[in-house]
Amino acid sequence: MFGGFGVTELLIVLAIVLLIFGPKRLKNIGSDLGNAIKGFRKAVTDEEAEAAAAAKAGAQAQSDPNVIEGEVASQASQKEDSHQQSRV
């Protein structure tokens, strides 16, 4: 079943664990383990969403190779400066 462990061996291990920790503490351990797994899954999902957003942003940036992030504002200010200088 589980790498050479049968049902009998698993029941013996479960009984020993139950005797060592007790039912209340075993319940707490189980709920803590469940919360840890839930947090791990959420972190993985968030990381995948961030990676997908970054890939999407990268694809949009590649659609206009002449514009570098942050460059649009500097180009606009340069055009204003040159336009104002031509008026003077």
Image: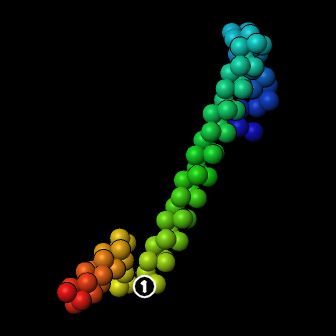
Q: Is residue 36 left or right of residue 28?
A: left
Residue 76 in sight in this render:
yes
Quadrant including the N terminus: top right
Q: Is residue 80 left or right of residue 28?
A: left
Q: Nearer the viewer, residue 22 or 10?
A: 22
Badge 1, how many Cα within 10 Å: few under 14, some, many 20+? few
Quadrant including the C terminus: bottom left
Residue 75 in sight in this render:
no
Amino acid at dot 1: Asp
Query: How many numbered discs, if any?
Result: 1
Q: Residue at horizontal 53%, vertical 71%?
A: 56
> Mark 1 highlights which residue?
64
Residue 83 quadrant? bottom left
Q: Residue at horizontal 43%, vertical 81%?
A: 62
Q: Residue at horizontal 80%, vertical 30%?
A: 7
The colour scheme used to paint the residues is rainbow
Q: Nearer the viewer, residue 7 or 25?
A: 25
Up/down of 56 relative to 21, above or below: below
Residue 6 quadrant? top right
Up/down of 83 relative to 70, above or below: below
Q: Position of residue 68 (x, y in %)?
A: 35, 76
Q: Is residue 62 left or right of residue 12?
A: left
Q: Nearer the viewer, residue 8 or 76?
A: 76
Q: Is residue 13 left or right of residue 61?
A: right
Name of the residue lying farthest toward the bottom: 86
Q: Nearer the viewer, residue 29 or 12?
A: 29
Q: Residue at horizontal 74%, vertical 10%?
A: 22
Classify mark 1: helix, strand or loop: loop
Q: Position of residue 37 (x, y in %)?
A: 65, 37
Up/down of 20 relative to 86, above or below: above
